[in-house]
Amino acid sequence: MNVTKYENQVEALSPQTLFTGQQLIWLPECESTNTEAQTLVVKNSATEGCTVITDKQTAGRGQRGNRWEAVAGENLTLSVVWFPSFLVANDQFQLSQAVALAVHDWASSLLGPDPALRLKWPNDLFFGDQKLGGILIENTVSGAKIQSSIVGIGLNINQQNFGIPTATSFGKLTGRHYALPPLAMRLLESLERRYLQARAGQRVSLRADYLRALYRYEEWHSYEVAGRRVTGRIVDVDEAGRLMVEIDGKLQRFGLQEIKFVYD
């Protein structure tokens, strides 16, 4: 493993992977691990699977332009670089599914096969109605294919207090305190397994696993669409990653900004 910074903090990290996490960069603090990873890609300094981990992220980004906030030293915050040239731009959601499933697999190894552990579309990790973690994937497209992907992952591990009631952590759920390096190692292994599954073209099994883990799948719940509260049932996610919801007897498809989950 090529540990380029703060070797003493990552001695416990020796993931059993072919490439993911084999080039590892540990930063005590940075604005965003995704930004750091992108800089390495631009400089041609990142090998496939290059991983940037930080203790403290000061300007982390989430979905919909939101900020990702986490207490320093209590959570997992990392970004992985992949070069998925096997995917065309229209198939970006294949990668999103694989990453989300990897995080779900990893979380299941900690919490067991709990039915409350779900993936909220498109790729947040939830326990019940509370968020355990989020994923932000930033792709660079060249021609018809994806040239590089920066996979940013933030997971609430030991943090106990949150500014919003819809967030929780593994520590709050289990009453345990977790050592972060071993968790990071297992996460990198889980990510590579699902990435290799995507690279092998196992679309059907990935989709089936994703739907099995999907939050609110085949259940009736409240949503907000165009400022109006509606009752709908998630029935699928299409190839483009749009959420397919039955509302008033009709099947509608929604992009990321077009539907809002409502919690009663």
Image (cartoon, rainbow, N blue to C red):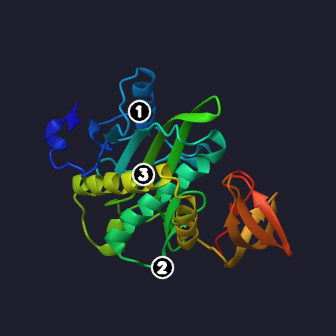
Q: Which residue is mark 2?
A: 115
Q: Is residue 58 visible?
A: no
Circle 3 residues within 10 Å: few <14, some 14–19, many ≥20: few
Secondary structure state at the residue bearing disc 1? helix
Observer-nearest residue: 99 or 123? Answer: 99
Three-letter code, disc 2: Pro
Query: In percent of the image, x 75 and y 54: which residue is there?
Result: 258
Q: Position of residue 219 (x, y in %)?
A: 67, 79
Q: Position of residue 238 (x, y in %)?
A: 70, 59
Three-letter code, disc 1: Ala
Circle 1 residues within 10 Å: few <14, some 14–19, many ≥20: many
Circles 2 and 1 in contact, beta carbons < 8 Å: no
Q: Position of residue 241 (x, y in %)?
A: 66, 54
Query: In percent of the image, x 40 and y 42: which residue is there?
Result: 79
Q: Which residue is mark 3?
A: 196
Q: Which residue is mark 1?
A: 37
Q: Is residue 152 left or right of residue 189?
A: right
Distance of label 2 from label 1 (alpha carbons):
34 Å
